[in-house]
Amino acid sequence: MKFDADVESKSLFLQTFTYSSIGMALVSLDGQWMKVNQSFCDLIGYTEDELLSRTFRDLTHPEDLEAERDYMQQLLEGKIESYQMRKRYILKQGRVVWVLLNVSLIRDDYRRPLYFLSQVQDITALKRSESLLIESERKLTEELLRNSEKLTIAGQLAAGIAHEIRNPLTSLKGFLQLIKKGPDYKTEYLDIMETELDRIEVIVNELLLLAKPTDCKYEEKDVKALLQNVITLLETQALIHNVQILTAFTPGVTIYCDENQMKQVFINLMKNAIESMPGGGKLLIEVKKKRELAVIRFIDQGHGIPKEKLKQIGSPFYSTKEDGNGLGLMVSYNIIENHRGNIDVASEVGVGSTFTVSLPIYTPTRLHPAFH
């Protein structure tokens, strides 16, 4: 009776193995294919005869081999009863498929290992869907982070605007109250009030530049000519501050820019440099070519900026000047970024600061790819 039961059990297993809709395989202890069903052949693209001359290692993706060897060793040592893993098979045509693999170790009546029983399901479509979902979640997370950063910046900007405008408004309100008390007000009250209104106007105008930039008119411009125009404008201010402007220009350096915006950047950087030297000094302006970049340096002998404050340069309403609002530099950073360039700052307290503007060089035969 026991014999009949064993035969029936083996027959049932063979039918299940043969007609299963999922791939099934018997693998020897050394990794050789012993028997595979048709579903497995359909999945892998090899016939049974072709597979029986190969090992599981021949079809397994190299990046998955080590993990599977480790699982098989644990099975043989009796540490685990079975294992499940996601792995890749390399098909006969060279294409790669993802499968869900379930493996158990078949033993004899004396618990001696005989062979591995593998069950394989194609999960390539599932992996593709998971990858798309992960990518979608990544993009969503990035978008949420960007929006969060925008809200943070908007909040900081709003707080800065409120602070900067509240101060002159407080002064105006105070002087208006004094004027309302009687006719014996001093004329200088009106002068101070006018100054405070001018201050508000400057802040609002610079904010408008950030919020609604003017239409740019890009043209080929010589950097030396642009800087010389700006130097002419600021020569008087430099003389008043006892600042000597020195230049070291490499000739023929051209950029593709909006002339007025670029002059605005150079004016901001030169004015800051001049005002950083109240006791006088030298301002060196250099223009050089570095590969495909025009490199413009403004090197002053001012009081310098502490290292811990360098990261704040270019932030709204941060300035090392007592009456500064930081918007001029922020506008400058924004303009240079729109011109596909960048501004770097190096500074040492008591020695001075160097503001370096790097911009793509324009050549008549080829427009820099950043502007396409």
Image (spheres, grey):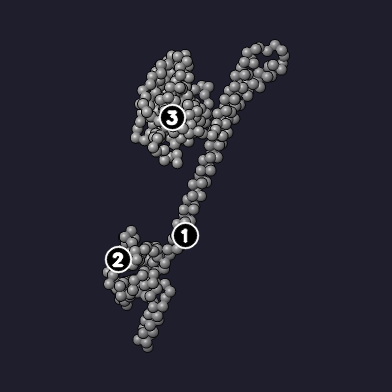
Q: Quadrant of residue 124?
A: bottom left
Give the residue pinned by disc 3.
221
Q: Which of disc 1 and disc 2 is earlier in sequence?
A: 2
Q: Are marks 2 and 3 in contact (CB under 8 Å)?
A: no
Query: What's under tag 3, amino acid-wise?
Result: Lys
Q: Which residue is mark 2?
A: 58
Q: Nearer the viewer, mark 3 or mark 1?
A: 3
Q: Quadrant location of the N terminus? A: bottom left
**Mark 3 → mark 1, Cα distance in angstroms:** 51 Å
Amino acid of disc 2: Asp
First of labels 3, 1 by sequence position: 1
Sort mark 1 into few (<14), some (14-19) or many (20+) by Cα contacts within 10 Å: few
Type of the residue with mark 1: Ser
Residue 355: where, in percent of width, then height? 41, 27
Residue at image point 71% right, 17% down = 180
Q: What is the x, y in percent for residue 94? A: 34, 64
- Residue at mark 2 to residue at mark 3: CA–CA distance: 63 Å
Q: Is residue 207 left or right of residue 246?
A: right
- Please give the residue where the numbered disc 1 appears in the rendered image: 129
Residue 60 lies in quadrant: bottom left
Q: Residue furthest front?
A: 365
